[in-house]
Amino acid sequence: MRNLQDLATFVATAEHGSLSSAARMLDTSPAVASASLKRLEADLGVALFVRSTRSMRLTLAGERLLGRSKALLDGLREAEDELRAGQDAIEGQLQISMPSDLGRHVVLPWLNDFQARYPGVKLRLQLTDRLANIYREPVDIALRFGVPPESSMVALPLLAENRRVLCASPAYLARRGVPASPHELADHNCLCFMLDESVNDRWRFRKGDEEIEVAVQGDRVADDSEIVKRWALAGLGICYRSRIDVHADLASGRLRLILPAWEGVNAPLTMLVANRKQVSPAVRVLREFLVSRCKALLGA
């Protein structure tokens, strides 16, 4: 037996009583259906039909084969239906890596709501500012700011416009004064973030057609973005953070925006996966959910 299509042709012919009817049902030609049936008989070494010019009837061997063939084909269809249903289900485990501050204070409450809506989804979270290697580590999804470092990754945008902003606590600004331009940051304690031993101590700004880069310095550097924000909240200096990270603190007055006329660099929030095959229904729905929450938060 060369393939299941030969078996399907046999069953259709037996049920419809003719090759032409079977061919129409299978959306093929009578010649192809006839060749398929002859091939099946040759493979089995028995005649399955008694043929005449006007009709076809099953032989004893054909009758024996028919019941088992129908059960086999029905079982395969059921298996295919179950697989398709599983592919469409919003369930399974998602392993997600995300920046520490964003994860704890922004995304975590959203994920609680997501799981309440889709209880079949289980989450395993990795909160780190280090970019997880989604090819080697047990990570399905990475949420990251900025342009993906590898073009081979699939990047699904969550928040396209997410500018970095300057901010500090009211206590710090009352004590040290408010800088009137980016150049005056040289006179302030700037709280810097470090990633992979590289300190982000050159802050870029734009106002209209003017773009400048300012070298900053301070007495504190951390490789954890949440720590940098905590220092700013404690009145220890000025930080340069993405707007989504400090949105709640700005809204509450715990932090104040500095130099709002000067735009910081854009830090788009992106969902990264290794390849398109990993974009399961659960991943698609999670992405849509996060996009809607980002828009609601920032009015994007």
Image (spheres, helix red, strand yellow):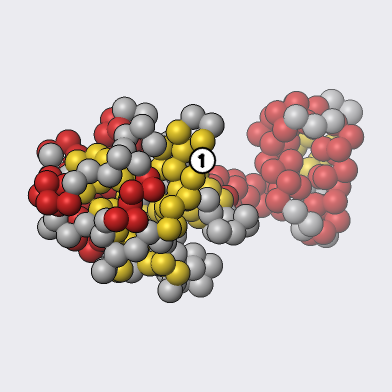
Judge left or right: residue 80 versus residue 252: right
Residue 137: x and y, percent? 45, 71
Relative depth, front residue between 262 and 15: 262
Residue drawn at x 43%, y 53% is 214
Q: Is residue 226 visible?
A: no
Whether 50 is drawn above or below 241: the answer is above
Quadrant holding the N terminus: bottom right
- Label 1 is placed on what type of residue? Glu
Q: How many marks?
A: 1
Q: Is residue 176 visible?
A: yes
Whether 251 is drawn above or below 98: the answer is above
Residue drawn at x 70%, y 28% is 25
Judge left or right: residue 118 versus residue 183: left
Residue drawn at x 11%, y 46% is 174
> Where is residue 274, by image quadrant?
bottom right
Label 1: element kind: strand
Residue 191: x and y, percent? 28, 60
Judge left or right: residue 221 versus residue 137: left
Quadrant holding the C terminus: top left
Label 1: how many Cα within 10 Å (few below 14, some 14–19, many 20+): few
Residue 80: x and y, percent? 53, 47
> Where is residue 216, by image quadrant?
bottom left
Residue 73: x and y, percent? 60, 47
Relative depth, front residue between 263 and 43: 263
- Which residue bears the numbered disc 1? 211
